[in-house]
Amino acid sequence: MDVIRWAKKRGIQVTAEVTPHHLILTDDLLVGYDPVYKVNPPLRTSEDVQVLREALADGTIDIVATDHAPHSAETKSGLWSDSANGLIGLEVALPVVMKAMQDRDYSWRSVAKTMSQNPARIGSHQANNLDIGDSANITLIDPKAATWTYTPELTQSKSRNSPYYGMDFNTSVAYTIFRGKITQIAGEVQNA
């Protein structure tokens, strides 16, 4: 992070991203060699996690990217050395980030910037400004949701390689709307 800060201070065009799992999971979880925690880059120390959280809060990190990697049970079980890298996390990316950042200065404006505006800008995508009559592509969140627990039953993915099962969250995605049609209501996929 120091090198990225150094480069940005000198006007060098550089971007940085972090995944939700690198903001909340640590290498302590690797003791049992559970393949669900096998990711690339690998999980790091709690000190590294704190550095990443600070860099996200101060704007050094531009993007939160899920690195969503669904795998079959066969490719994520067995020996650590034989299992695939990656985990699923798209559905709970926002709640995980907000849980990880709850003790930092990370506003909803920061969420919009790092999870929507910056990725669009860096990827050279047109801003999604909404006007009356436009088909919306938006996510509506419940910032003060009742505490809920993520379970495999709530997963819409066919894959089940999530390290977040059993975690409690108090932020949730209330709706996703794609091309003007509701595609998800608080954990339920709609026929879009």
Image: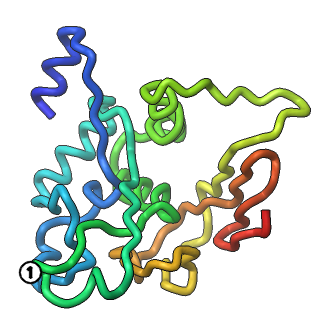
Residue 16 vs 71, above or below: the answer is above
Q: Nearer the viewer, residue 22 or 81?
A: 81
Looking at the image, residue 9 sits to the left or right of residue 156; the answer is left
Q: Nearer the viewer, residue 137 or 148?
A: 137
In the image, residue 97 lies at what x, y percent?
40, 54
**Point 36% across, 55% down: residue:** 67
Q: Quadrant of residue 74?
A: bottom left
Secondary structure under badge 1? helix
In the image, residue 23 lies at what x, y percent?
28, 55
Q: Please state the total of marks drawn on the protein image.
A: 1
**Point 38% across, 81% down: residue:** 72
Q: What quarter of the picture does the C terminus occupy?
A: bottom right
**Point 30% across, 35% down: residue:** 61
**Point 12% across, 73% down: residue:** 28
In the image, residue 34 lies at what x, y percent?
19, 83
Residue 73 vs 188, above or below: the answer is below
Q: What quarter of the picture does the N terminus occupy?
A: top left
Q: Residue furthest right?
A: 133
Q: Nearer the viewer, residue 79 or 112?
A: 79
The residue indicated by pointer 1 is 31
